[in-house]
Image (cartoon, grey):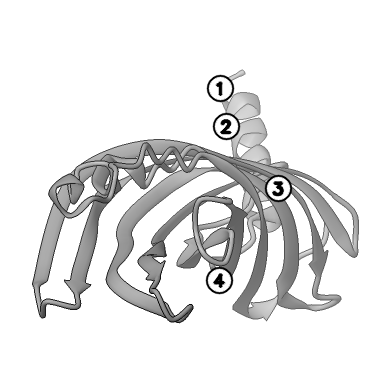
């Protein structure tokens, strides 16, 4: 009986190992709609790895850089009808975040339908630069730690023999740049505080690559 159990265990592990795909590295680009920013979006870039793939799941880790912002200008029309500049305020944010989560997929020989829930944590900052016609220059900078989830649903085109793929995903992110942007205060310069909340839906494009040939079942 012990020999039978040992044989079954060895067979199961051998089958699992034979289907195990080696790691892949990937880069991705995403754009998320946000009408409070210019030009109505904020962006991110990611570098990560699909650690392995087995059956219908593949764990992933990555690091992502988010960035975006908006600018506001105060102006008036003088007695001659010319537009006169008064002041300018530029708000910018960026963030570095780590992400970890499973990728669930249904796969055939050429493609995958995937769903990726991913947990992120990291740091973000916001910078506000104010200037006016009186040569007043003011800079404010805020920083904050934060965490959030993203959810991606998409389609991946697999390499026919080599490891690698091209992916296109619809992504919802709970990333909120308001954690830092809303701390900027230029009300004394006649710019009202904003209430940014940048949770959004966007499009992600990813290119993956690896070494060796793809294993088939």
Q: Earlier in the sequence, mark 1 or mark 4?
A: 1
Side of 29 relative to 149 (left or right): right
- Rendered location of residue 216, percent (x, y): 82, 62
Alpha-carbon distance for marks 1 and 3? 20 Å
Classed neighbour count for the residue bearing mark 1: other residues with Cα under 10 Å, few (<14), some (14–19), many (≥20): few
* SS category of the residue bearing label 4: strand
* SS category of the residue bearing label 1: helix
Q: Which residue is mark 4?
A: 26
Q: Which residue is mark 3?
A: 15
Q: Where is 204 relative to 182, above or below?
A: below
Quadrant (top left, top right, bottom left, bottom right) of the C terminus: bottom right
Q: Earlier in the sequence, mark 4 or mark 2?
A: 2
Q: Which residue is mark 1?
A: 2
- Rendered location of residue 128, percent (x, y): 22, 62
Select label 1 or label 4 by which is in front: 4
Whether residue 75 is visible to the viewer of this picture, yes or no, is yes
Select label 2 or label 3 by which is in front: 3
* SS category of the residue bearing label 2: helix
- Rendered location of residue 201, percent (x, y): 64, 45
User: Do the residues under discs 2 and 1 have CB atoms within 8 angstroms?
Assistant: yes
Alpha-carbon distance for marks 3 and 4? 27 Å
Q: Which residue is mark 2?
A: 6
Q: Where is 67 relative to 56, above or below?
A: below
Q: Nearer the viewer, residue 110 or 16?
A: 110
Whether residue 214 is visible to the viewer of this picture, yes or no, is no
Q: Residue at x 57, y 69 (%)?
A: 28
Q: Residue at x 13, y 59 (%)?
A: 141
Alpha-carbon distance for marks 2 and 3? 14 Å
Q: Earlier in the sequence, mark 2 or mark 3?
A: 2
User: Do the residues under discs 2 and 3 have CB atoms within 8 angstroms?
Assistant: no
């Amino acid at each position: 009986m012990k020999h039978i159990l040992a044989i079954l265990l060895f067979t199961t592990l051998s089958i699992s190992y034979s289907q195990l795909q080696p790691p892949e590295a990937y880069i991705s680009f995403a754009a998320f709609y946000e009408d409070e920013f210019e030009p109505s979006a904020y962006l991110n870039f990611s570098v990560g790895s699909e650690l392995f793939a087995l059956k219908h799941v593949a764990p992933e880790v990555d690091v992502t850089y988010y960035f975006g912002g908006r600018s506001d200008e105060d102006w008036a029309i003088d007695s001659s009808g010319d537009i006169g500049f008064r002041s300018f305020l530029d708000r910018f944010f960026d963030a570095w975040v780590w992400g970890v989560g499973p990728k669930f997929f249904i796969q055939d020989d050429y493609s995958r339908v995937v769903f990726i829930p991913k947990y992120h944590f990291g740091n973000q900052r916001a910078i506000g630069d104010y200037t006016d016609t009186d040569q007043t220059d003011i800079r404010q900078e805020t920083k904050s730690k934060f965490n959030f989830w993203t959810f991606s649903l998409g389609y991946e085109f697999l390499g026919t023999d080599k490891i690698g793929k091209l992916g296109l995903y619809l992504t919802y992110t709970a990333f909120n740049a308001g954690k830092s942007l809303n701390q900027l205060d230029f009300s004394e310069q006649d710019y009202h505080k904003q209430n940014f909340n940048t949770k959004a839906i966007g499009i992600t494009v990813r290119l993956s690559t690896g070494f060796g040939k793809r294993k088939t079942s």
